[in-house]
Amino acid sequence: MIAKMLGLLRVQFLLVIFSVFLFVSVIHKTSAASDYTQCSLRQNRTCYQYSLARRRNLTCAVNGDKFRNCHQIGNAGALNLTCIAPDACKQRCLASNCQSLQCNSKKCNQYCIRGRCNMECNSDECVQECDVSGCEMTCPKGAKRCTQKCSRGNCKMHCPLGVQYCKQSCNKGRCIMLCDGKECSRSCRYSKCLYNDEPENVTIPTVTSSCNRAIAPRQNICYQHCLSGDCDMMSVDGYSMQSQVCYGGNCNMRCNAGEKCSQVCVGRRCQLVTCTSDTCIQECIAGGCHMECYSKICTQICRKGNCNMACLSSNSKVCYQTCIGGGCLTSCEGENCSPRCFGGNCKHSLYQPPGLIATEACDEIQDETCVQRCSSKIGCAVTNRPSNPLKISNQTCSDGFCLMSCTGSDVCNQVCSGQKCYTLSCNSRECVQVCSGKDCGLLECYANTCTQKCTGLGCHLKCHPSVEVCHQICIAEKGRCSLECWAKQCVTTML
């Protein structure tokens, strides 16, 4: 017994060590492949796989020679899990969205903690435990026993003809069970269950409410908890803070509380619209959320990905988006725009004031060098394309709002001492950006060598796989810089 406990503790300790190592690797190392088939840890004839972030296909296939079991753990991002093992498969989705989960083993167990899951089970015994809402489970025709436990509702279970025993437990919200098996069992506590003969697309009445869960007058906080989804929360007078938690998705929130507005969306497609408090926060677990913020501090955390964030006030001090699953869009008019994209395929656009017109003209040309000096408060732009290339393109921006697109020169340089410089694209032999202003935005680089030196705020460097060396020089302070590096060599220097 003691030896078994020590073995479990050793597994947990090694997984923690590996997770830290993997986190560093995600930030500083790159891999063009999205498939992962290796064992992160080997213990007691079990192959352990662990994925921290990004979009990834996780495959564990063992035949019994060395391993009899597979244990897959997804901590964040959008994952597709495939498990083939003789004895048992365990698949855990902690804070990720398991878009598809295929299991072919004698026994299959799936646990979904904070993200939605979709399980396809080819086993004698299938178990799905879902602590959030919106999970789906499909059992094979020859299964002996299939079980789904749903804590927050909006779950769906399908047991076709040939299944011996099928059971669904639904604690809250609404659940759907499509059962043609030999024996079907339901347990619906504080919930609404739908059966085969009922329409699947049931219209849930929209909840337009303020504080339907709890009110904390001493802390001056208004809460709304929405289990089934499709809730609205409008601005409520008399409270300095408002909070909405939406488990089923498709919730809307409008908030003008004085201190803080927060929305936590476990499902998909929530909207935090017209937030004007001092601090505005949206956390989106399953992805697909939208946020429009006029606050001093705007923050969006998007775990699955495909979220939109718009900071629409020039008075915003910080606009911060963390996109783990990838595919996010940020539009920013604030002073300090800091998007962080761990899953790739993100886009970042800055506010362009009226009168900013892209031009290919240089202020002067010296020895095959395009020189542009911008001191206009409405901004400048320079474009150098292969149709009329110059060896060197230099842009100096003193008052900000500068754009640069450089795809033909051997060397592209941008020096920004103002605010909101934005190097849209740089595809040359060498690309250098020096930023001492308030916000340099995004430098998206395809050059052989990419360098960003940032002594200001809000710098963001993204190096694509074609880059040989990607180098970011930054002040060692949280929130100063963001690096997405897919290059062959990634270098970070802290000042």
Image: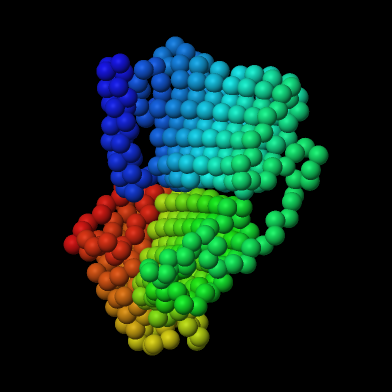
Locate the C terminus and report the quarter of the image it occupies.
Answer: bottom left
**x%, y% of residue 452?**
30, 63
- Residue positioned 63% across, 22% down in the render: 145
- Residue positioned 59% across, 21% down in the render: 125
**x%, y% of residue 29?**
34, 44
In-image side of 8 versus 119 (left or right): left
Q: Based on the displayed image, in which of its 4 quarters is residue 136 positioned? A: top right
In this view, the residue in front, 311 or 360, is 311
- Residue positioned 62% across, 26% down in the render: 146
* 121 is higher (above) or lower (below) than 260: above
Locate the N terminus and report the quarter of the image it occupies.
Answer: top left
Residue furthest out toward the front: 218
Whether residue 269 is visible to the viewer of this picture, yes or no, is no
Residue furthest out toward the top: 65
**x%, y% of residue 4?**
31, 18
In this view, the residue in front, 440 or 266, is 266
**x%, y% of residue 207?**
64, 63
Whether residue 201 is visible to the viewer of this picture, yes or no, is yes
